[in-house]
Image (cartoon, rainbow, N blue to C red):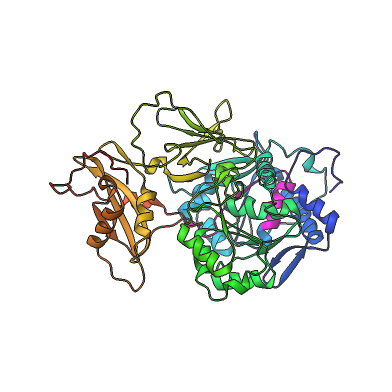
Amino acid sequence: MQDLPADPPPNLADRVRRAALDHGDRPALYWRDRRVSWSELDAAVTAAAYGLAAAVAATESGAQPPRVAIALPNTPDFVIGWLGALRAGLIAVPVNPAFTAPELRHVLADSGASLLIGTERVRGLVAEAAADLPALTAVHETPPTGGQPGPDPRARRGGDDLAVLLYTSGTAGRPKGAMLSHRALLANQEQVDAIEPPVVGPDDTVLLALPLFHAYGLNSALGAVVHHGATGVLLDEPDPTAALAEIARHRVSVLVGVPSMFLAWADAPAARAATASVRVAVCGAAPLEPAVAARFTEVTGHSVHVGYGLTETAPVLTSTLVGPVAKAGSIGRPLPGVHLRLVGPDSVDLWRDGQTVPDDDPDELDISDAGPGTDPGQIVVRGPNLFDGYWPDGRDGPDADGWWGTRDIAYADADGDLFLVDRLGDLILVNGFNVYPHEVELVLAGHPGVAESAVLGVPHPRTGETVRAYVVPAPGRSVSGEELLAHCARNLARFKCPTAVEFVDALPHSAIGKVRKTQLRSATPAGPPAPADDARTEVPDGH
């Protein structure tokens, strides 16, 4: 390819070329026994860019370039295919390689992908569904190479152009393709860069164990490695023991993980020695129980910082690294450059950019359970890292002023630290009073007989809804539903307590560990009538 134009539109793949020029012999990636230098990665990305461009040349039509689906585990081929697509000016569509046939067919058909790079299993599923995927014209095992060198496509694709379609996990419905531009991906890197001290720098080695088809692994982990010219350690089998061995072997300095990883590491005997090189540990994607964070810190000596974000925000919005103290249970404060509001059910701002919005009626009785600080409100955000709506027409994206409602509910304490409460769609209304499932799940998690739980609202003839809990018992512990109901009664206001507990062997999870409540909800029967003496018309008692 030709040298970069003087002022190309920003494109994450350009950072590979920069790292190759600055320190080409340094390692960009480790994977198993393979070492890939930045010069080697840059050459492989260029070859893939030409190969991909040639493979889809006949399919380019309409307002958007061809889409390239990548259904691979965390391997160098994923990284090369992803960055090659960006360098070639194409739109990447990362796909979970463990998808079932219907899930895979939906993403490929919805995105209109014309080329797929996938595992043997994925290629087999696609072959069976070929009749349903007319747009898909080429299927490859590895990123194609070759083609005729031509004008550098980086001169025309970058900035506000669409870079990637990231399909949401589907925990709240059928997956939709979030449209993220090159600008959004890089903006989130710059927002994280504004944190002091730096989260990632060029001398860091970052664990790449999170699925790269997800926004958290793709941009917060891999994107940070590319952005800074750091080193990434790829793990395609997220076994806790194997992960610790790789962390120790390559002296990983930045851990980027999800709660299940930190839970497993906290219970591993070798954790302290293996993590001796760790400088910062960050957890995201799902709520981290304070007890798990405390246990990890006790075992390893490292604090765990928590971040919050969504696929649609590229993905990070808040972090406990922003404030002076990482409070237990908090998601921290907005990143520099992210504007954040908490909006009440009446569409009135409760909190905006770190400041509580004065109440128009200070004499009104406050019966919220949030404690000092604000009432719970929906998180509404604005910033250059936001997506451009859902594929293909940009529906449900930011409004005309750039604001987008996340449908997550949080409150801010008196210091301006945010605490996630629940999803707006998961809110349970019992006699008109709000019950946040996460609060009930935290109480259940405090019982030694509970390994995991999920709480849903089910219809009730008298109270509108009632609370039902699905519980995975802790191994080797015996616990009854009556015992858990009594435990909840001791720790929750009565209207928040479950009226039924159902024991299950496991809960359905997404690839990054979120409970798929839609699957539970579809199989949930209506709640039983409450006992005659169940006084569910009481005013919340402040518990």
The residue under the point 50% across, 50% down is 105
The mark tally for this picture is 0
Please tell me whether residue 271 is drawn above or below residue 113 in the rendered image. below
> Picture coordinates of residue 141 (x, y %)?
64, 61
Left/right of residue 408 with respect to residue 29 in the rendered view: left
Residue 256 visible in the current orientation: yes
The residue under the point 46% across, 48% down is 170
Q: Nearer the viewer, residue 329 or 345?
A: 329
Left/right of residue 409 with respect to residue 482 in the rendered view: right
> Picture coordinates of residue 191 (x, y %)?
66, 43
Residue 518 visible in the current orientation: no
Left/right of residue 263 with respect to residue 234 in the rendered view: left
Magenta-span inclusion, residue 325: no
Please tell me whether residue 38 is drawn above or below residue 318 in the rendered image. below
> Picture coordinates of residue 382 (x, y %)?
58, 34
> Picture coordinates of residue 420 (x, y %)?
46, 45
What segment carries the magenta color? Answer: 79-100
Q: Nearer the viewer, residue 525 or 483?
A: 483
Magenta-span inclusion, residue 86: yes
Please tell me whether residue 392 is drawn above or below residue 440 in the rendered image. above
